[in-house]
Image (cartoon, rainbow, N blue to C red):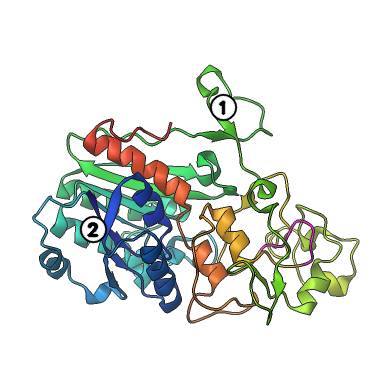
Amino acid sequence: MKTLVSLFSGIGGLDEGLHNVGFTPLFCSEIDKHAHESLRNWCSRRSVDPILATDINDISPLSLKKQLGLKVGELDLLAGGPPCQSFSLIGNRKSLDDDRGLLLHKMIEFAKVLKPKAVLIEQVKGLLSAKGADGISGSALKVIISDLQDIGYDVSFRILRAADYGVPQLRDRVFIVGVVKGGEFEFPSPTHFDPKKKSKQRDVFSTDKVPYISVKDAIGDLPSPVLKGRIENIPSHLDITPPRDRERINGVPEGECLARQLHLPADQRQRLNPEKDTTKFRRLAWDLPALTLRGGEAFYHPEENRYLTPREYLRLHGFPDTHILSGPIRARSGTVKDLDQHRQVANAVPPPLAEAMGKAIYSALFGDKKKNAA
């Protein structure tokens, strides 16, 4: 058994992919009460029994090391995706000055004490240009890399697109990997390609790639969801779209957004900006991967006048249908104190991408027993 300590576990997206490769979690943490229950559901389904914690600030690395009975360097992998709002390109960017930005340093704190063979961190692209204490763009990432190097890791990072690894979603994220010196880590090669792009990427070395998975491939076989108040035939496949939102999306073509439909009535478009509001009231296209799923907005079905359901979100994220969510399914407006099901999925690492990264890390640490995803 290869051992894993998972921080900021969410609903288990990263853990699902890593577990498929052979990493078994000894410890998972998730502070949100609904995501925590979804994570508990995942543990039950995968028959794993880690210590389940809530607020990682209440756990000291030394106490966890003692509780797990781990010796320094014995843990195989420390992995996590700390809350990323501080580094997001959307909204205010407070970087490492924000409490959520500081949570990224929790990964370093645990790495210093546990000294795992490898460290895996997932973050939004905004981290690449985020400012550290010196106020210089990009210095936040340099601090993280330097801290990992000081502990004794060879560190590399790269932006990976989920669609390149079999996820029906154009989701770009930064992955930082630290392996003990001497390990030869290589990022996984893409397994899928964009068939609509002319082909620099389709050369003699990419004949084993297959086309991107589309929205239709992912959700086209699902029946229409039941309405709010009805019994769900498929878990989390519930339509809670408010009547006014059904009216506003009506007439928006497949793959388009309401803001750019200038032929529609002004009271339907309201104050949407054609240049800025391209993800609001947006239908997905059947023949393309989904756009990046986000916490504050829900995309619309390619044909039906409704939001996509959490079950459809799970499929677009690469989760199996056996993944069960807990918590409410809310209409898409306002801020919330806890995570509804759409937001839980949007915050997760897509399992197929996590699995590709897990295979690459396994290969770096243990040789060719688990081949690189290529």
Decide which of tag 2 and tag 1 comes sooner along the chain: 2
Depth check: give the residue in front, 371 or 84. Answer: 371
Q: Position of residue 48 (x, y in %)?
A: 31, 61
Q: Could you tell me the amino acid type at mark 2?
A: Ile
Between marks 2 and 1, how big is the CA–CA gap?
Answer: 36 Å
For the residue pair 81 and 311, the one nearer the viewer reads as: 311
> What residue is at 20 percent from the left and 56 percent from the top?
111
Q: Amino acid at mark 1?
A: Gln
Q: Is residue 292 visible?
A: no
Residue 39 in the figure: left or right of residue 190: left
- At horizontal 53% and vertical 42% (from top left) the residue drawn is 166
Dot 1, crowdedness within 10 Å: few (<14), some or many (≥20)? some
Mark 2 lies on residue: 108
Disc 2 element: helix
At 53% from the left and 80% from the top, the residue drawn is: 336
Where in the figure is residue 365, as x and y percent of width and height?
23, 38
Q: Is residue 242 above or below residue 374?
A: below
Q: Is residue 145 left or right of residue 205?
A: left
| First to last magenta residue range | 299-305
Asked whether residue 304 is in view, the answer is: yes
The residue that mark 1 highlights is 201
**Mark 2 Cα shell of 10 Å, populated few (<14), some (14-19), many (≥20):** some
Q: Residue furthest top?
A: 204
Q: Position of residue 368 (x, y in %)?
A: 28, 30
Viewport quadrant of the C terminus = top left
Indicate whether residue 287 is drawn in magenta: no
Q: Secondary structure at mark 1?
A: loop
Q: Is residue 205 left or right of residue 121?
A: right
* Total tally of numbered discs in the picture: 2
